[in-house]
Image: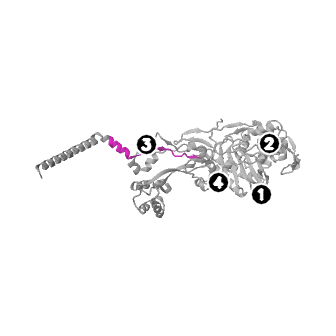
Amino acid sequence: MTPEHSRGLKTRLSLISLMMQLLFLLLIGRLIIVQFVLGPQLRERSTNQTKVRIKSKTKRGKITDRNHNILAINRDMLDVYVDPKVIKTAPENLARQLAPVLSVPEEKLVKALKRKNRRFVRLKKKLDYSQINNIIQLERKYYGLSHVIRGNRIYPKDQLACHIIGSTNFMNIGIDGIERFYDSILAPSIDPEIEPMIDWEKYLAQPDKVYKNSPRSNDTIVLTIDEYIQNITESTLEQGCKRWKCPRGTAIIMRSKTGEILAMANYPNYNPNQYTKSPEASKRNNAIWMEYEPGSIFKIVTAIAVLNEGIHTPDSKFHCGNGEIILPNGHVIRDVKNNTMLTLSEIVQKSSNIGIMKVARHLPHVKFQDYVSRFKFGQRTGIDLPYERTGSLWGLRVWDEHLAATVPFGQGISVTPLQMLCAINTIANEGRLMRPYIMLKRLTQDNKITLQLQPKISGWVMSPETAQTMKEILVGVTESGSGIRARVNGYSVAGKTGTSQKALKSVGYIRGKVVNSFAGFLPAENPQISIIVVLDEPANAPLSSVSVAPMFREIAEQTMRYLNQTKLFAQANIRMN
């Protein structure tokens, strides 16, 4: 090597050594800056990256009866998912650890985990929340395994009051009943301003504690219904429908003075915990959905109109044609019995079609329409339940010779069971038409009342004197008239039977198909409860006095016994709106 080459090599080595020393000094300087200058800021950032942001999400609110027995509540469940494409361990290994936690066979899990062409596979739906610790521990070991907490709606009483409570869909949104009507109150919500930062290590170690401290429950809806009275009503209705082989039936109990619904039952019913597996027909709340011709119960409307207008008195007499009369158009109107001379009171008590037709002849059509409007037939009652129907006043609008004779005894118009109950309840309530309601109050999570519903008068139908007169007439129905099987030992009962033929459009009335009903209240002198029972198409078309009157008696007897034992209304402070 020449001297020139030797000097050049030494120079290059010196430069390389100098550069390495400079880089080393820069590295030491950077470490000093990171440690002492940027250290606090980086430590804070590191701490934040070990925390999980949990939005404050309220649970769906509870629904209870008036005694705070739970009818609907949320229960947290887990949905467990996996991304098979990123799972590093053998499917058999992970399946072996997941099987006892998920209660799913290993073979099924292995099959799911081997679906490498999928990025999202659900391994378990609605896993009990108690397994969350085990799931999180597995998630820490195996990237690609995850879970979601979902609020699952539970109905502890199964079928009880199903048509009142309703149900929710898979997104926990109310789709029927109270769940739908008050969805805005019950529905879970997320508050974007409240997002607590939870230490990730603590979250993994104590997930139960962290989660339970975070979500709140939305407000509770307390209903007017009583669980025991509801059970009585449902049981009696089911037995009656099976006894008379009815495809449908409904029964409602209302607190006479306030309009509170104490029970609302329908047959058939369904289990809202198995909503998708239930027949659609069984989900319909016929108490507010069923439209039917009321038949003879509607005679109370005609009688009230003529009495309140002073056109007739209870003792006014009418010849009832010996049980049959032929209209000029050839239509024949018949009574069950061959009645001759009857007073207005007797016409109602013996349920004479011919008699009430003659009574109505002295009532101008405009006045008749006015009284039907006062009862708010053809309108929704305003009850706080969805899908209420209005009924039809077609016969009043047409009002030809035939309908002028038949509408007064309940043909040519249609009503809902709740409308008819509200109508007879006006007699119990001295002429006041009460708005029915089913939410009693709204409570916060710490049981503070934010809303207390009060009785509301929808209108005045008749004078208190007319109501008292009609009350006495209706007591006669159960003492010596068509409703004698509705008598309750120890109480005076005011009520009215109704048997109406069913009609089909373009066909007319169908022989052998009827709707039976009985509506009334007790004790007549100081009404506490008003009840209606309706049977649709009972076999062999029996009279209402035979089919529904005994069902009314059974419901009324048990309910009054319960009210006397519990003093349910003793502490109530009624304020009318």
How many angstroms separate mark 4 from mark 3 (CA)?
Answer: 44 Å
Q: Is residue 193 visible?
A: yes
Can you identify the residue that label 2 sits on? Answer: 398
Which element type, helix, strand or loop, lies under badge 2?
helix
Residue 466 is tagged as none
In front of the other: 369 or 338:
369
Measured as percent of width and height from the top left, residue 12 is found at: 17, 47
Asked whether residue 307 is in view, the answer is no
As measured in the structure, the alpha-carbon distance from the residue carrying label 4 to the one carrying label 2 is 35 Å
Q: Is residue 165 found left or right of 26 in the rendered image?
A: right
Q: Provide the residue designation for mark 3.
A: 196
Nearest the eye: 131 or 108: 108
For marks 1 and 3, the one nearer the N-term is 3
* The quarter of the displayed image where residue 313 is located: top right
Q: Nearer the viewer, mark 3 or mark 2?
A: 2
Residue 291, position as x, y percentages in the image: 72, 48
Mark 3 vs 2, N-terminal side? 3
- Looking at the rendering, the stretch of residues picked out in magenta corresponds to 41-66
- Mark 3, secondary structure of its residue: loop
Check residue 60 for magenta coloring: yes
Q: Residues under labels 1 and 3: Cα distance?
A: 67 Å
Front of the two marks 1 and 3? 3
